[in-house]
């Protein structure tokens, strides 16, 4: 069945039928992390949003080249092109080489993404590996007359660009308002206007990450890498450019201007942005004490957390909101997500063992539920509606299981397909308990040992009972006698 995907484009502010530049093939670029600290909640939402889009496009039969960069140079502390490079600062504070910082946090980020069942992109290019491409792009923009050299740095001339094109179309900002709102050229005297942004920055003597260029020993501006690398891997015009809403301005606005100035076109057919996460109604921030890393979330070690939350619980929770809506984290909401996920996973397991035959009557609602799920997913990835329709499927599975009902083969196949192809392949929700087959083996062994210990206790052989307890403790299994029986937990 030919199905159309509708996708909302931030630039035109409309939902349109998705038509790729090249039939059957999708080029997608998503801004990745600046790797100077642990992956946190703010990373989980874009990663999961674009992972589901990647999976959905593949499910619809497209071949997808998914590029997501690693920013390892040029991202300064302030959007006004001032302050230290975030990675260089971390390297200085920890007495490390900048590339040690990059390697450490890239690996940690990738590990957290693997736990969230986020598929790795087709290409994960690093900014520092594309300095030549970025220098070439600066030359092109200079040649086109939309940039100027000032004291060894190169700046994009926003005012000149605004005269021929329109600056601010993506974010909806108007240049006059920006001028009124900006302060004096505080510490950025090289710029003609505070709206101008750096394409190339001359490095101060103490700046470690530096490369030779026609203008100075320096480093590229943050926005430049995404224009250069998306063009290199996806061409001058590609289908989807994604990222969090916080990147619309200045990052993507500047990228769009760079593309227009160098190629004469924006180069992106759908700008897709996910909304942000709040915590108990507040914006997340290091100064607010509500900055939670993914590691802390999985282990339950942050003060705001009542318990650990598994990666799949986080994934399910994020999919319960539409990607363009805000999403508020709270213990109550996460605990509700945990229960919902458990029900969905139980049905995923139960559906395969339902009885079925070619002669049983067809249930009308199975085909209707399937249609609802596709409609929701194709309507700008409406995962909350798709999930609520999936819970209709859960009710059908539970009903058939409880009553021992025999399903028609067609319904049975549709249901099993929904749980494998939609739940697992498209939404990426998998049963974490399945991964713990080793744990269930350990459980069986511990119970055998505890039975021997109970026998020793029944025979009043306290020495033997204590020996078993101590030996279990020594290998990392702690037991505790309660009124209900003996409980055990792994301590390692
Ligand atoms: Zn970017």
Image: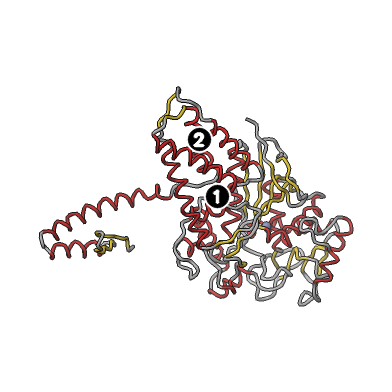
On the image, the x and y values in percent for residue 472 come to: 24, 61
Residue at image location 54% in from the left, 54% down from the top: 317
Identify the mark nearer the N-term, 1 or 2: 1
On the image, the x and y values in percent for residue 415 come to: 49, 35
Q: How many marks?
A: 2
Ligand 1: give its quadrant: bottom right
**Residue 230 position (above or below residue 38):** above
Residue at image location 48% in from the left, 52% down from the top: 312
Q: Is residue 468 left or right of residue 60?
A: left
**Which of the numbered marks, if any, corresponds to residue 120?**
1
Q: Nearer the viewer, residue 87 or 308?
A: 308
Which residue lies under the disc numbered 2?
417
**Residue 190 position (above or below residue 58):** below
For discs 1 and 2, the disc positioned in front in the rendered view? 2
- Residue projecting furthest to the top: 359
**Element under disc 1:** loop
Q: Is residue 299 left or right of residue 465?
A: right
Q: Nearer the viewer, residue 216 or 148?
A: 148
Residue at image location 21% in from the left, 55% down from the top: 449
Q: How far apart are the alpha carbons under marks 1 and 2?
A: 24 Å
């Amino acid at each position: 069945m030919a199905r159309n995907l509708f996708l909302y484009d931030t630039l035109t502010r409309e939902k349109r039928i998705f038509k790729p530049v090249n039939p059957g093939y999708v080029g997608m670029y998503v801004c990745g992390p600046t790797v100077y600290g642990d992956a946190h909640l703010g990373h989980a939402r874009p990663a999961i949003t674009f992972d589901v889009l990647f999976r959905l496009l593949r499910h619809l039969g497209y071949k997808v080249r998914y590029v997501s960069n690693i920013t390892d140079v040029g991202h300064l502390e302030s959007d006004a092109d001032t302050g230290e490079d975030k990675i260089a600062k971390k390297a200085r504070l920890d007495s490390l080489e900048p590339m040690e910082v990059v390697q450490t946090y890239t690996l940690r980020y990738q590990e957290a993404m693997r736990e969230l069942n986020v598929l790795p992109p087709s290409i994960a290019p690093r900014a520092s590996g594309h300095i030549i491409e970025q220098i070439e792009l600066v030359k092109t923009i200079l040649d086109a007359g939309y940039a100027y050299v000032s004291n060894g740095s190169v700046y994009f001339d926003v005012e000149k660009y605004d005269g021929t094109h329109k600056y601010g179309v993506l974010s909806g900002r108007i240049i006059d308002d920006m001028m009124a709102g900006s302060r004096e050229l505080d510490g950025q005297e090289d710029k003609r206007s505070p709206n101008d942004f750096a394409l190339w920055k001359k490095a101060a003597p103490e700046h470690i990450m530096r490369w030779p260029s026609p203008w100075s020993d320096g480093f590229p501006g943050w926005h430049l890498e995404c224009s250069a690398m998306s063009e290199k891997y996806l061409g001058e015009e590609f289908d989807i450019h994604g990222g969090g809403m916080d990147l619309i301005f200045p990052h993507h606005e500047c990228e769009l201007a760079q593309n227009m100035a160098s190629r004469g076109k924006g180069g992106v057919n759908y700008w897709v942005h996910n909304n942000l996460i709040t915590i108990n109604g507040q914006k997340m921030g290091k100064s607010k004490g509500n900055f939670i890393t993914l590691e802390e979330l999985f282990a339950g070690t942050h003060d705001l957390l009542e318990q650990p939350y598994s990666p799949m619980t986080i994934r399910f929770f994020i999919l319960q909101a539409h990607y363009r809506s805000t999403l508020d984290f709270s213990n109550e909401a996460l605990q509700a997500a945990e229960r919902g996920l458990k029900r969905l996973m139980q049905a995923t397991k139960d559906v395969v063992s339902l009885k079925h035959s070619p002669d049983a009557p067809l249930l009308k609602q199975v085909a209707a539920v399937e249609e609802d799920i596709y409609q929701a997913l194709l309507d700008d990835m409406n995962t909350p509606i798709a999930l609520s329709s999936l819970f209709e499927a859960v009710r059908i599975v539970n009903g058939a299981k409880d009553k021992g009902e025999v399903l028609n083969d067609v319904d049975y196949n549709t249901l099993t397909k929904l749980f494998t192809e939609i739940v697992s392949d498209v939404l990426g929700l998998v049963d974490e308990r399945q991964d713990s087959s080793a744990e269930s083996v350990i459980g069986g062994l511990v119970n055998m040992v505890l039975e021997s210990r109970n026998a020793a206790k029944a025979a009043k052989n306290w020495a033997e009972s204590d020996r078993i307890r101590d030996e279990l403790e020594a290998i990392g299994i702690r037991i505790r006698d309660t009124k209900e029986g003996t409980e055990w937990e792994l301590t390692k």
